Amino acid sequence: MKLLVIEDNLAMQTTLQRSFERRGFRVSTCDDGERALSRWRASLPDVVLLDLSMPGRDGLDVLSEARAEGLDTPVIIITARGTLGDRILGLNIGADDYLPKPFDLDELEARVRALVRRRGPQGSNPHGADDRPLTPEFCGLRADPDSGAVYLRGQPLDLAPREAALLRALLAKPGQAVAKERLFDLVFAGASEALPDAIEVVAYRLRKKLAASDSSARLATLRGLGYLLQAEAGDA
């Protein structure tokens, strides 16, 4: 599997290259927006990891021109620019996924492999966000089981990776309690340094974001049982 990393931070670029090469990928790199398209054309990657803030040319400009040229390689945007506006713009231009920094390398690898599986041998569904397989809707919320993104009425929610992981787990069983221990295992997979109570912090942040959104879904705590996602009275 071939991966193109377009990232100007050399420490991050080196980390990604070494990590993915250890996992069996062939990795090409580029640290400049002006050279990114020529490297993309030359390497013919299976997936592109694209930073947004780069010297020479912004990553969104690179992505826009690539799609205009017909370069349909799946793209995951990786950036510290994690605002909702940047995410929506990137997805609308043609990105397949969006992962704000800092991120977990295991999660990034899972998303890369999911994109390759979804694309398939014929290159179907190259970059259409609207064609992604989504979970059934609950209070306007849907989760993409491949990319991990969560959408509210078709627009991506501005969630941190662990908040999104918690919401995905609850969306799989809306209206049903999920044990804290089970949620901790899903949200903090591979994070050996995390304490069990850390799930409470993630739940607190997710609860606030849901309350501030247009969704009627609310995160409820059931003492001794865990958490559940439920609709406000009168909503479904």
Image (tube, rainbow, N blue to C red):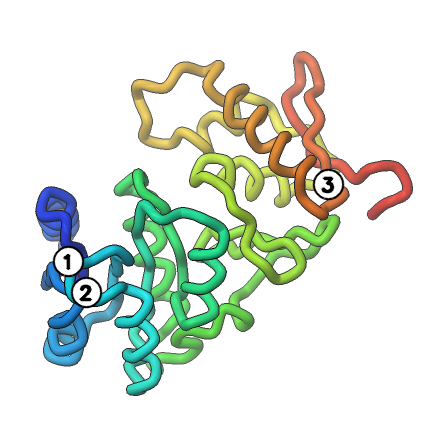
Mark found first going from the N terminus, 2 or 1 = 2
Mark found first going from the N terminus, 1 or 3 = 1
Distance from disc 3 to disc 2, alpha carbons, whole Å, reads: 39 Å
- Residue carrying label 2: 1
Q: Residue at x 70, y 41 (%)?
A: 174
Q: Secondary structure at mark 2?
A: loop
- Measuring from the top left, give residue 54's x and y in whole percent: 20, 58
Of circles 3 and 2, the one toward us is 3
Nearest the viewer among 12 and 46 is 12
Of circles 1 and 3, the one toward us is 3
Residue 123 in view here:
yes
Nearest the viewer among 191 and 234 is 234
- Residue carrying label 3: 217
Q: Find out whether the residues at labels 2 and 1 contact each other: C-beta distance under 8 Å.
A: yes
Q: Residue at x 37, y 72 (%)?
A: 119
Label 3, residues with CA under 10 Å away: few <14, some 14-19, many ≥20: many
